[in-house]
Amino acid sequence: MSYAIYAMGFRFQKRIRILPGVRVNLGKRGASLSIGGKGVTANVSTRGVQNTYSIPGTGLSYVTKREGAGCMIMILGLLGMIAALKGILA
């Protein structure tokens, strides 16, 4: 006799808007930074960069992914830019 074991996983996702078009995404496995809006969005995390290009209202999109260690440097640079922008806009 064989038995199937089904594992259910909990999901956690929280988005924090920093500026218009800039969000920090928090999840159970880490954090990422999303920049953009309808049509084009770049998501940068420790696992890589993901760009999404879409035609709003159609459900059509194209996704590119790039993995590598240089992505963490991009995150730090983007966070620095956001901090500078918040200082200028405040």
Image: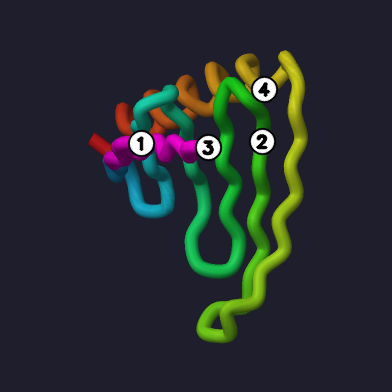
| Residue lying farthest to the bottom in this orientation | 58
Instruction: Please give the residue where the numbered disc 1 appears in the rendered image.
Output: 9
User: Which badge, 1 or 3, is on the more N-terminal residue?
Assistant: 3
- Main SS of residues in magenta: loop
Q: In this view, does 53 lie above or below 46?
A: below
Dot 3: few (<14), some (14–19), or many (≥20) neighbours within 10 Å? few
Q: In this view, does 36 lie above or below 6?
A: below
Q: In this view, does 60 lie to the left or right of 14?
A: right
Instruction: Please give the residue where the numbered disc 4 appears in the rendered image.
Output: 71
Q: Which residue is drawn at 72% across and 63% down?
A: 62
Are the two marked residues, 4 and 2, in contact with CB atoms closer than 8 angstroms? yes
User: For the magenta stretch, what is the residue range?
Assistant: 1-14
Q: Is residue 70 left or right of residue 14?
A: right
The numbered disc on residue 1 is 3
Indicate the amino acid at tag 3.
Met
Q: Look at the image and tell me in which quarter the C terminus lies.
A: top left
User: Which badge, 4 or 3, is on the more N-terminal residue?
Assistant: 3
Indicate the amino acid at tag 2.
Val
**Closer to the camera: disc 1 or disc 2?**
1
Residue 56 spot, x, y in % from top left: 54, 79
Q: Is residue 64 above or below residue 71?
A: below
The front one of 54 and 35 is: 54
Q: State the CA–CA distance, disc 2 to disc 3.
A: 45 Å
Q: Which residue is drawn at 67% across and 49% down?
A: 51
Q: State the CA–CA distance, disc 4 to disc 2.
A: 7 Å
Are the two marked residues, 1 and 3, in contact with CB atoms closer than 8 angstroms? no
User: Which badge, 1 or 2, is on the more N-terminal residue?
Assistant: 1
